Image (cartoon, rainbow, N blue to C red):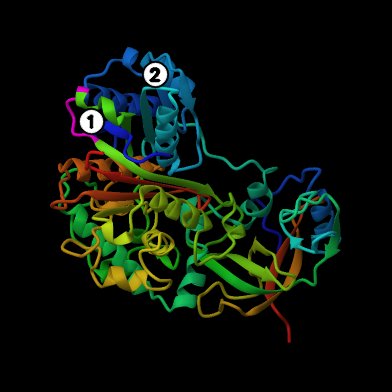
């Protein structure tokens, strides 16, 4: 795909984040979509492509009054929105649509209008994992980590540092759910959830949504917003069963999606000014830094504990506070994308001065899938 | 030590042989007749070379503890804290399981320790493969 030919011209979250019992899940999608459309002056008739996850694109098109010529219902977990951006960029390139809306909404906390989560007992997960007592991501996503820790000599203190550093970023963000600074001891003394993971190593559970609007770079002059260009994209999938990952110390889906995006963008790691790595749990930035090639194997935990990703560090990471402190509705990828766009627009609460390139990396399921988007604010 | 209340599998045509095996106290894997890959979970073709010529093979039941968490939240059929583990079978494949006949503590659950399969009947049709520290 050619680079720099598609741009984000609309990006907004729901009016509020956190606990929003007055909106159902589809209402959260719509609130974010209306905010993004208003920001760039679009009406439903102006949008001809729609992508979403959790809800179907059919439901969103109808609810918002859109008549699409292109729909994408890719739903592979929290990185679905990265993959939507990738597919949307390709669709715009191919002329399948001109103006594409990507929406996310999730009543993760209040659970209004959410389909119930269940694992079918005839599925492979239902037959070969569920009988052994996992209950959702805190007891599943975390299973590979003891193997990683043994392989590379990583400590619980180092994993706790991920949460400490991200809280520093959250403390700068008025919209972050948790803003009080915490210490390593606070993390290590918080309630045990699934050894070695304690409460403060796990993401929040909140309500919210977000929406993006993409169009061709040549049309960006028609919009009032500062365009954010898409330099490179990648996606992949590995397994729906965390027990069946090829290697518990690295994600194959990350190792495919990340380098694909870097190659497409034609950049090196030294070019990256800002980085988002989907952090449902504290080990994910560690896996992401290594699998995206920022660091050699086994070095990411020490890199984070050494404050290299903290405010003032060389590689600002998860500058909104991340899923650990900002918000996490369940499919967090949209919020990581929103923060990358804010950084590229120069309007983030914890703005990185002069940042020109932002890498946004997402995970879906429990290391099941992955999507990577590389943004730039530099015109083609 | 039956644990009523836990989620139980419902076999499909492609997996029925595995659950028939556990009921007969045998841990059954599959091996590709063409490329010799031994694989799990069950499916009627080889995930490496796509051959449909595959055979069912009985595993030794010997494995090592590969990774785990110790879950501290309540789940039907379990008394927290309990370990949700992944073992690596001597034949190569890994599978999720529980470790029984062993304290559910980091001190007792040491990565790479040898474990062996035990079969725990849940009802008349479903028997689960669990693992315990290897004897001797």
Q: Is residue B13 above or below residue B136?
A: above
Magenta-colored stretch includes residue A224:
yes
Occupied quadrant, residue A229: top left
Mark 2 crowd level (few <14, some 14–19, many ≥20, 10 Å Cα): some
x and y, in percent, of residue B8 in the image:
69, 49
The quadrant of the image that shows the N terminus of chain A is top left
A78 with respect to A16 (left or right): right
Q: Quadrant of residue B20?
A: bottom right
Residue A236 at least partly seen: yes
- Up the image or down, A122 lies above or below B39; here it is above
Which contiguous range is marked in magenta? A222-227
Q: Chain of mark 2?
A: A
| Residue A281 located left or right of residue B66 | left
Question: Which image quarter: residue A65?
Answer: top left
* Residue B81 visible from this viewpoint: no
On-image quarter of the C terminus of chain A: top left
Q: Position of residue B57 (x, y in %)?
A: 85, 63
| Marked residue nearer the N-terminal end (1 or 2) | 1
User: Which residue was labeled with disc 2?
Assistant: A48
The residues tagged by marks 1 and 2 sit, at their Cα atoms, a distance apart of 24 Å
Where residue A145 is drawn, which disc sits there?
none
Identify the residue shown where x is 33% and y is 37%.
A207
Dominant secondary structure, magenta: loop
Write down the residue under mark 1.
A15
Identify which residue, A204 or A260, lies in the foreground: A260
Q: Are marks 1 and 2 on the same chain?
A: yes
Closer-to-camera residue (A201/B53): B53
Element under label 2? loop
Is residue A82 covered in magenta? no
Count residues near mark 1 (Cα–Cα under 10 Å), then give few for <14, some for 14-19, many for 20+.
some
Q: Secondary structure at mark 1?
A: loop
**Chain ID of residue with mark 1:** A
């Amino acid at each position: 795909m050619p680079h720099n030919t598609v741009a984000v011209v609309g990006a907004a979250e729901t009016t509020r984040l956190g606990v929003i019992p007055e909106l159902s899940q589809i209402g959260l999608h719509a609130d974010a979509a209306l905010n993004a459309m208003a920001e760039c002056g679009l009406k439903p008739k102006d949008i001809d492509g729609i992508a979403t996850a959790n809800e179907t694109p059919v439901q969103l098109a109808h609810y918002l009054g859109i008549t699409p010529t292109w729909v994408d219902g890719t739903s592979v977990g929290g990185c679905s929105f990265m993959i939507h951006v990738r597919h949307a960029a390709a669709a715009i390139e191919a002329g399948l649509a001109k103006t594409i809306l990507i929406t996310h909404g999730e009543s993760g906390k209040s659970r209004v209008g959410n389909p119930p989560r269940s694992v079918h007992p005839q599925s492979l997960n239902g037959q070969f994992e569920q009988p052994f007592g996992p209950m959702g991501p805190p007891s599943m996503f975390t299973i590979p980590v003891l193997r990683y820790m043994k392989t590379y000599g990583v400590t619980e203190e180092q994993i706790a540092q991920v949460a400490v550093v991200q809280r520093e970023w959250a403390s700068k963000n008025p919209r972050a759910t948790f803003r009080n600074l915490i210490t390593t001891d606070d993390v290590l003394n918080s309630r045990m959830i699934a050894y070695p993971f304690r409460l403060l190593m796990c993401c929040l559970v909140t309500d919210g949504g977000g929406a993006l609007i993409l169009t061709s770079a040549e049309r960006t002059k028609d919009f009032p917003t500062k365009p954010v260009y898409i330099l490179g994209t990648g996606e992949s999938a590995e397994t729906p069963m965390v027990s069946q990952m090829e290697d518990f110390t690295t994600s194959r889906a990350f190792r495919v999606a990340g380098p694909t995006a870097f190659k497409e963008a034609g950049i090196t790691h030294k070019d990256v000014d800002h980085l988002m790595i989907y952090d449902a749990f504290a080990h994910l930035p560690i896996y992401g830094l290594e699998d995206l090639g920022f660091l050699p194997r086994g070095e990411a935990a020490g890199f984070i504990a050494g404050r290299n990703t903290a405010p003032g560090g060389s590689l600002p990471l998860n500058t909104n506070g991340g899923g650990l402190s900002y918000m996490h509705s369940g499919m967090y990828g949209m919020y990581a994308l929103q923060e990358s766009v804010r950084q590229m627009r120069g309007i983030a609460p914890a703005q990185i001065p002069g940042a020109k390139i932002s890498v946004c990396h997402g995970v879906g399921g429990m290391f099941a899938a992955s999507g990577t988007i590389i943004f730039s604010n530099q015109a083609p | 030590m039956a644990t009523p209340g836990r989620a139980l599998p419902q076999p499909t045509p492609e997996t029925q042989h595995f659950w028939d095996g556990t009921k007969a106290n045998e841990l059954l894997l599959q091996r590709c007749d063409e490329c010799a890959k031994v694989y799990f979970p069950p499916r009627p073709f080889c995930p490496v070379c796509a051959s449909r010529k595959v055979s069912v093979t009985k595993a030794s039941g010997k494995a090592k503890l590969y990774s785990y968490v110790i879950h501290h939240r309540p789940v039907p059929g379990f008394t927290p804290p309990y370990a949700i583990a992944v073992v690596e079978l001597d034949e190569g494949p890994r599978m999720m399981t529980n470790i029984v006949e062993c304290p559910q503590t980091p001190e007792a659950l040491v990565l790479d320790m040898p474990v062996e399969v035990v079969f725990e009947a849940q009802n008349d049709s479903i028997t689960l493969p669990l693992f315990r520290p290897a004897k001797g």
